[in-house]
Image (cartoon, rainbow, N blue to C red):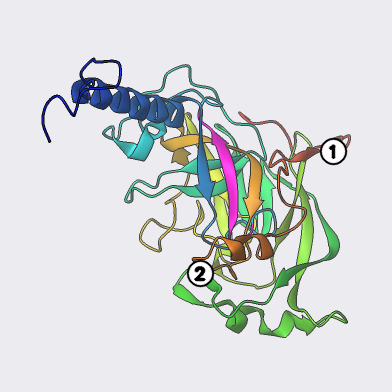
Amino acid sequence: MSAESRARDDGQPEDKVDWVAELRGLALMLLAVLAFHSFVAKPFYIPSISMMPSLLVGDRLVVSKYAYGWNWSSASFHLLPRGDWRLFGRTPEYGDIVIVVPRNRKEDLIKRVVALPGDRIAVVNGQIVLNGKPVPQAVEPPVQIPFDEKLTCQNGIGEGPCYDAFEQYRTRLPSGRTVYELPTLRETLPNGASYLIIDHENQRLDHMPEIRVPAGHVFLMGDDRDHSADSRAALDEPGLGGPVPLSDVGGRAEFITFSLDGSQSWNPLSWWQSMRGGRAWSTLRPSLQKPGPDPAGGHGE
C-alpha cells in the first residue's frame, strides 16, 4: 500500500501511536492502584473457617489500611522489608477484626483483637480471663453452617475434613439442606464489643496460662476457637506465636462486599447462583453492648 493510500481523507497522514506516552499512562495507572491498595483499602478473601461464624469461606471483604496508621505490612504485596516502624500509629480496639502477617510467613491472616497492650490474658476451659476477670459468654442458638465436603478444618496438629470434626452436629433441615448446627456463644469484651464464637471441643488451645501483653502488641484469636491458628499457638503449629507487634497489623476489616458458597465454576453465569444472600455490605465492626457495672477491667492494669 502506497503512502498516498495511507493518507487520511482530509489529506493529512495518520497519527502514529506514541508508545512512550501510552506506557507512561499505564505506569501511572498501576501506581495509582498500588497507592490506593497500600494507603486506603484493599479487597480480602476468606479461605478458612478460623473466623466462623462472623466470616465464612468465600466471603469477600474490604480492609481499610489507615485505621491504625501505616507500616511495612500496609504496602501492596508486602513489597517493603519487615520492620517495627509505624507512621501515625494507633492502637486497635477490643473486638476489631484485623489482618496480620505472622513473623515466619508472608501471607495475611485475619483474627480478632481480644487483648490490648498491658492486658493480662489467660484462657481457662475455653473462656478468656482478662485482667483477672472472665470475659462474659452467653449461650446463643446454634449457628447453621452449610455442609461442604471440601471444607477443611485446621487445628494444632494439621488439617483435615470438617465433617470429621463436625459430624455429631450434622443435620438435615426440612428444606432438604444439610447443615452443621454448631454450639454458639456470645462473647462480650470490656468495651461492650459483642460477637458470636464457636467452641465445641475441649482441646489444648482452650487452656493457656496467664501472660501479659507487651507494649506495642495485641493478642489475637479466631472466632472459631477450635480451628484457629492464632496467638494461643506457636509459630510452627502454625500460629502467631503469642502477642503480635502492631507493626505486623496491616489493617482493619470493615464490611463484606459479597460472598460465594463455593458452588461456582469458571462460568460467570454460575456466580449469581452461588451468591450467599444477606451477606453483602454487612459490617464487620462488632456490635457494642452496654458494659455491666463490673466489666472485665480496662487494659494497662
SS class of the residue under badge 1?
loop
- Residue found at the far left of this picture: 2
| Mark 2 residue type | Asn
Q: Which residue is labeled 1 in the image?
A: 289
Q: Quadrant of residue 173?
A: bottom right
Location of residue 229 in the rendering, given as x and y in whole percent from the top left corner: 49, 59
| Residue at position x 70%, y 38% in the image | 285
Q: Nearer the viewer, residue 237 or 161?
A: 161
Task: Give the position of the N terminus as an image quadrant.
Answer: top left
Picture coordinates of residue 257, whole percent (x, y)? 64, 45
Residue occupying the point 47% across, 58% down: 233
Say which residue label 2 marks: 155
Q: Which stretch is magenta?
A: 56-65
- Residue 206 seen from this side: no
Q: Is residue 9 one of those drawn in magenta?
A: no
Q: Is residue 62 magenta?
A: yes
Question: Is 191 drawn above or below residue 46 in the view shown?
Answer: above
* Quarter of the image with the C terminus in it: top right
In this view of the protein, can residue 52 be seen by the observer?
Answer: yes
Question: Where residue 27 sits in the image (x, y, percent)?
Answer: 29, 26
Q: Residue at x 71, y 69 (%)?
A: 145
Badge 2 marks a residue whose secondary structure is strand
Q: Nearer the viewer, residue 174 or 212?
A: 174
| Amino acid type of the residue tagged 1 in the rendering | Gln
